[in-house]
Image (spheres, rainbow, N blue to C red):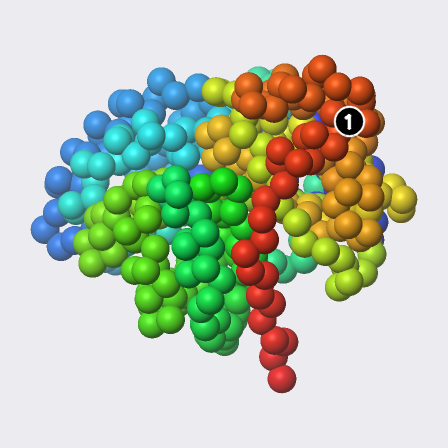
C-alpha cells in the first residue's frame, strides 16, 4: 500500500491502494538543468543565459533561478530554478515561447539534462516558506519504477493509412539499454492525422530515448515517414532533429495504477483536444477523476496516464471489459453529469455532446476521443 496525495492541490493524507504520480499536488518545484558547454564558449553561454534569465523572470509561476559553474571542469554548468508549482513551469517549458528563448544557447551547448523535483523538505527557509504560501510536498510518493513519456506529431492529411502501415511494421529495438535501463512497452496510436507514441522505461529515460534513436530499424522507420510529416525535419541535421523532438515531447502529468492485476486489461488511448489555453486545466480534471476512480473496485480502468502539452491532452488507459462497457469511466468521468464540464474544455468539434441525452453524449464523446491502435509492444522480461 502507498499513500497518495490528491491532485486537487490540497495537502491531505489519504490511504490508498494505488500507485500515483502527479504534477498537480500544488507543491513547489525545483528544476535542475545540467549543461555541458563547448570549450571556449563559456562567455557566449553566460551572455545567452543572462538574456534568458531576464525573459523568464516575467513568466507566471517563476520564483527564482541560480547559475553555477563547476570548480573542477569549467565546461560543466548547473542551472537551478524554483517555481510555485509544476503546472506553470510545464506550460512554459513546453511552449513555443520557450523554444524561441533557448535558441541562442544551442550553438554553445554540447549536451543538457533536465531534472524536475517537488520540494519535500528544506532547512533554513522552512518557516518563511510556511508563511508565504509556497507549499512543500506533504509526503513521499512511492512509484512503480516505470518512467512514462510520449511523443506526438501530425502527418499530412491523406497520408494517414500509409503512415500507419509504416509505423506498424518495424522490428522492435533491443529492450536492454544498459545494466540499469530497459524498454518496457511502446504503444502507438493515431487520431486522424495525429500520431502518439507512448513509451514506458525502467531506468534512465534519456538513455533509453538515445538508445532507440541509434537503432537502424527505428531510424529506417523515422526516415520512411519523413515525407509525410507536417513539420519538416532532417534527422541528419542535429538542430532540425532537436527542434522537432522538442516540439513533439508529450510529458506525462499524472499516472495512477489501481492495486489490481492489469495483465489482461485492454490498452486504449483517448485524445482530448482542448480549447486554447485549457490544456492543463483539462488534464487536471481528468487526473482528479482517475485518482478517485482508482480507489473504486468497480472501476473498469485499472491504470491511467494523462499526457499534456499545450492544448493536446491524451489519456492512456488499461481497461477491463472494453472501452464501451462503461463510457463514463472510460472517459475519466466518475459522474456522467461531468460530461458537460468536460465538453466546456474541449474544442468546438466536441460540443455536439451538449445537445444529446447524457448516455448518448458519453457515447458521442468516446467516439470522438477514441484513438486507433497501430501497435502495442511489450518487451520480454529479463531472463
Question: At x 62% / y 46%, what residue is drawn?
Answer: 269
Apparent side of residue 268 relative to residue 124 in the rendered image (left or right)? right
User: With respect to residue 242, does 59 lie above or below?
Assistant: above
For the point 28% across and 28% down, the residue is: 53
Residue reaching furthest to the right? 298
The quarter holding residue 155 reads top left
Count the labels in the image.
1
In the picture of the structure, the residue carrying the numbered disc 1 is 360
Between 195 and 35, the one lying in front of the other is: 195
At 18% from the left and 36% from the top, the residue drawn is 104
Locate the C terminus by quadrant. Answer: bottom right
Residue at the left extreme, as displayed: 40
Q: Can you see residue 87?
A: no
Image location (x, y in percent) of residue 226? 30, 53
Q: Secondary structure at mark 1?
A: helix
Q: Residue at x 70, y 16 (%)?
A: 354
Q: Which residue is at the front of the view, 192 or 269?
A: 192
Tell me where residue 228 appears, x and y as whole percent: 32, 48
Q: Nearer the viewer, residue 113 or 248?
A: 248
Q: Is residue 5 above or below residue 335?
A: below
Provide residue 295's location: percent of width, then percent of height. 84, 42
Q: Residue furthest bottom?
A: 383
- Can residue 64 be seen here? The reply is yes
Most foreground residue, 52 or 254: 254
Query: In the shown orientation, is residue 129 left or right of residue 59?
Result: right
Q: Is residue 372 above or below residue 343?
A: below
Mark 1: few, some, or many residues within 10 Å (few <14, many ≥20)? Answer: some
Amino acid at each position: 500500500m502507498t499513500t497518495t496525495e490528491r491532485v486537487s492541490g490540497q495537502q491531505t493524507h489519504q490511504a490508498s491502494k494505488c500507485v500515483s504520480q502527479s504534477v498537480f499536488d500544488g507543491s513547489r518545484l525545483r528544476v535542475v538543468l545540467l549543461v555541458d558547454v563547448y570549450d571556449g564558449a563559456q562567455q557566449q553561454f553566460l551572455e545567452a543565459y543572462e538574456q534568458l534569465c531576464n525573459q523568464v523572470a516575467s513568466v507566471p509561476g517563476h520564483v527564482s533561478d541560480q547559475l553555477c559553474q563547476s570548480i573542477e571542469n569549467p565546461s560543466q554548468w548547473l542551472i537551478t530554478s524554483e517555481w510555485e508549482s509544476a503546472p506553470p513551469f510545464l506550460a512554459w517549458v513546453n511552449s513555443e515561447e520557450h523554444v524561441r528563448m533557448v535558441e541562442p544557447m544551442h550553438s554553445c551547448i554540447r549536451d543538457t539534462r533536465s531534472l524536475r523535483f517537488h520540494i519535500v523538505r528544506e532547512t533554513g527557509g522552512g518557516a518563511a516558506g510556511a508563511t508565504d504560501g509556497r507549499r512543500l510536498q506533504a509526503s513521499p510518493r512511492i512509484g512503480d519504477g516505470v518512467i512514462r513519456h510520449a511523443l506526438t506529431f501530425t502527418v499530412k492529411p491523406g497520408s494517414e493509412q500509409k503512415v500507419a502501415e509504416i509505423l506498424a511494421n518495424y522490428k522492435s529495438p533491443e529492450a536492454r539499454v544498459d545494466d540499469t535501463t530497459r524498454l518496457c512497452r511502446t504503444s502507438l496510436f493515431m487520431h486522424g492525422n495525429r500520431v502518439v507514441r507512448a513509451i514506458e522505461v525502467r531506468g534512465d529515460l534519456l538513455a533509453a530515448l538515445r538508445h532507440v534513436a541509434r537503432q537502424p530499424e527505428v531510424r529506417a522507420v523515422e526516415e520512411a515517414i519523413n515525407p509525410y510529416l507536417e513539420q519538416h525535419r532532417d534527422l541528419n541535421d542535429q538542430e532540425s532533429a532537436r527542434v522537432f523532438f522538442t516540439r513533439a515531447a508529450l510529458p506525462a502529468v499524472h499516472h495512477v495504477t489501481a492495486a489490481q492485476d492489469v495483465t489482461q486489461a485492454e490498452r486504449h488511448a483517448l485524445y482530448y483536444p482542448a480549447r486554447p489555453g485549457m490544456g492543463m486545466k483539462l488534464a487536471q480534471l481528468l487526473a482528479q477523476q482517475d485518482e478517485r476512480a482508482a480507489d473504486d473496485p468497480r472501476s473498469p480502468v485499472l491504470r491511467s496516464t494523462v499526457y499534456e502539452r499545450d492544448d493536446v491532452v491524451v489519456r492512456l488507459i488499461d481497461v477491463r471489459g472494453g472501452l464501451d462497457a462503461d463510457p463514463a469511466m472510460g472517459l475519466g468521468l466518475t459522474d456522467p453529469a461531468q460530461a458537460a464540464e468536460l465538453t466546456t474544455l474541449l474544442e468546438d468539434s466536441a460540443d455536439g455532446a451538449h445537445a444529446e441525452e447524457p448516455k448518448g453524449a458519453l457515447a458521442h464523446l468516446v467516439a470522438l476521443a477514441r484513438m486507433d491502435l497501430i501497435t502495442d509492444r511489450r518487451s520480454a522480461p529479463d531472463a
